[in-house]
Amino acid sequence: MQFVIGLIGLLLLIVTSLRRWLLRRESPQKQAIDYTGELYQIGSAVVARSRKDAPAGSVIVMHGFVENFLYFTEYYSNPELQLIMLTSADYHLPVNQPRFTQADWIKPPAGRPGTIAYDAGVLNQALEHLATGSRVRVHGHSRGGAVTLEAARQRPDLFEQVEVILEAPVLPQGKPYKPVPPLARWFAPFYLFAWQQQPISPANAKLFGPLDNPRKRELIMALPFNPRFGHTFVTNMDDLAKWMDSTGSDIYQHVKYGAILVPSKDRVLQVAAMRASAQQAENLQIIDVADCSHLVTADRPDAIPPLSGV
């Protein structure tokens, strides 16, 4: 019996030690582009701005969990747009040889990097100090939708004239497509490491919808490598669950107009819960996107409302 107890103790020690190592391990970066715009380091996050003026308006984009801002660049490729792109805290910046611009308005957000509230603080600094267009849109995908709503709750004054697009968003009282109990989240660093060995596999391919688009496949292949550390991945997961459970529908009062896009074949978030929450957003239009995966911008860009005046 003592031998068995000792063996169990040794196994637990090995597992917990390995988990600690995976939490601290830095993932290799798999995707980056040459970028000529401005880059601003704000705490543990980064904001990129394509141009100082905004003849066609300003668009701020906030990517989802394990994504990067390249998700949006094809759709918002109009050179007349001022495209402002956020990189979540402790994520790889998808830019080759980045050079940062200094600014006296930059302040590291309060709170813990990796949380929705932290990224919302970064978004608000970008909205207040970098968006110069007469028309402003904030487009958040998945977790980026929650960041957008949280930013509006933190600074409702900044969103009085802002159009919001919430694409397949994480919403108050939303739910993942499959339940992820706390014990499963404890093993998340092991899952992330395994996912990195095969980013697209028979087990997860259905999550992403059609995979015949080469650019979409490239984006998906980078997903498990975008969070820099295992602890970033875990913090994101834990905070997402907490935010969905604890946030009430009163958060919607801070956004004045825009749309929520609900894809019918979402396999990341539960469609019924997403729609039920969206129906409480009195100021936002609900757009049901038929036969579409969680990645609406990649699969059905025609479903995204055009930017007014462009």
Image (cartoon, helix red, strand yellow):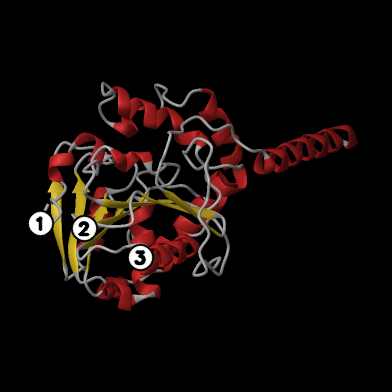
Give the position of the N terminus as an image quadrant: top right
Residue 102 visible here: yes
| Residue under numbered circle 2 | 57
Is the residue 114 above or below the residue 98 in the image? below
**Residue pictured at 47% horizontal, 62% vertical:** 242
Tag shown at residue 138: none
CB atoms of marks 3 and 1 within 8 Å: no
Name the kind of residue labelled 3 in the image: Leu
Residue 273, percent from left and from top = 27, 55
Sooner in the amino-acid sequence: mark 3 or mark 2: 2
Residue 23, percent from left and from top = 66, 43
Q: In this view, does 83 lie to the left or right of 7?
A: left
Residue 295, percent from left and from top = 28, 39
| Residue under numbered circle 1 | 309
CB atoms of marks 1 and 2 within 8 Å: yes
Q: Which is nearer the eye, 126 or 223?
A: 126
